[in-house]
Amino acid sequence: MLQSLVHKFFYAILTLLGVVTVIFFLLNKTPGDAAQMMLDQREDSEQLNNIRKKYGFDKPLTTQYFYYLNDLSPISIHSNDMDNYTFYKDNKYQGIRLFSIANKTIVFKLPYLRESYQKNGKKVSEIIYETLPNTIVLAVTAILIAIVLGIFFGILSAIFKDTFFDRVISIISTLGMSVPSFFSAILFAWFFGFVLNKYTNLNMTGSLYEVDDFGEGSYIQWKNLILPAIVLGIRPLAVIIQLMRNSLLEVLNQDYIRTAKAKGLSMFTIIRKHALKNSMNPVVTAISGWFASLLAGAVFVEYIFNWNGLGKEIINALNMKDYPVILGASIIIATMFISINIFVDVVYRWLDPRIGVK
């Protein structure tokens, strides 16, 4: 078990390295000049040169890449003549010096995601700290809706197999998987937030926190969570319904289920005590994968509903060529995706001891 987790840890490191590499070079190959975007319409040649020198745009792309990896790595290499003031200047790095080799110093520090190009040098870690919780709240609510309703309707569909109810659920599930999230978001915002506003009292747009009318602070507006969470949960809900139905039907055809029926156990008891746990493996796989995907897939939903999360921040960063924010957000999402997959491997072992963590 421990050896397997160690292997997965190194696999996660290699995966993150691949994510950073691909996104870094793709972003730097896109048309446009990030330095000009930072200066907008006020640039001149001297200002552009200063910006390019400050952010390393004047260096070869491979050099910029290795500099970024050095900032990102917990163990990094720095100049030996860099004094403590320079090392901790503006709280850029937080760590300790380990040892020196020749004219270089090996440092153990927190990963440094650099600073935003557009937000007056604001640290990317601070931007993520401010926006990621909103995205997590949205994703967790969406996946909980999908889990509860998906398992419930999946069980009912299996019990009432080939009936009118089963067919209706199947059609709805197919529509849920087919309709793009951005279209569902626009439709739900317009219908429930505008057409039926006087009945639902829901807003077309809005984030978790809203500013007080008197400007004295912010407060939580839970009703703004309803529409984006439902929209974000539609596709995983449809997948979970179908997986739960098919898996449960397969389990209900097993010999031990027939034995339980022969003993006179009710269908409710059979499903609760015997069939449900054994049919959850594919559902758990879907839940884990979709939850991780929701963190990345919330981009358009957050933007349409004006939800101040990491997804909306990514779109704004793409529009402004704010590369450090895009890279930092991608690294965080990839890390969470990998962590969730490792956690699911452990859950698999609990659901079925015959399945080892590979």
Image (spheres, rainbow, N blue to C red):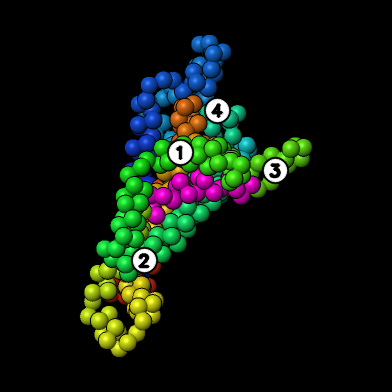
The circle drawn on residue 187 is 1
Mark 4 → mark 3, Cα distance in angstroms: 24 Å
Q: How would you rate the neighbour count of disc 4 (Cα within 10 Å): few for under 14, some for 14-19, many for 20 or more?
A: some
Which residue in the structure is indicated by mark 2?
A: 156
The circle drawn on residue 218 is 3
Q: How would you rate the neighbour count of disc 3 (Cα within 10 Å): few for under 14, some for 14-19, many for 20 or more?
A: few
Which residue is found at the position 45% from the left and 62% from the top? 148
Q: Quadrant of the N terminus?
A: bottom left
Circle nearer the N terminus (4, 3): 4
Q: Which residues are magenta?
A: 221-237
Mark 4 → mark 2, Cα distance in angstroms: 52 Å
The circle drawn on residue 88 is none
Q: Locate residue 108, reporting x and y percent.
A: 50, 49
Which residue in the structure is indicated by mark 4?
A: 118
Between residue 203 and residue 91, name the one nearer to us.
203
Question: Is 130 placed above or below 25 here?
Answer: below
Which residue is found at the position 36% from the left and 48% from the top? 176
Between residue 283 and residue 331, name the one nearer to us.
283
Viewer-nearest of labels 4 and 1? 1
Which residue is found at the position 53% from the left and 42% from the top? 192
Q: Locate residue 306, reporting x and y percent.
A: 54, 37
Is 322 situated left or right of 10 in this image?
Answer: right
Mark 1 → mark 3, Cα distance in angstroms: 28 Å
Secondary structure at numbered mark 3 = strand
Is 263 situated left or right of 315 in this image?
Answer: left
Question: Is 259 placed above or below 29 here?
Answer: below
Q: How would you rate the neighbour count of disc 2 (Cα within 10 Å): few for under 14, some for 14-19, many for 20 or more?
A: some
Q: Amino acid at mark 3?
A: Ser
Badge 4 vs badge 1, beta-carbon distance below 8 Å: no
Residue 228 lies in the magenta stretch: yes
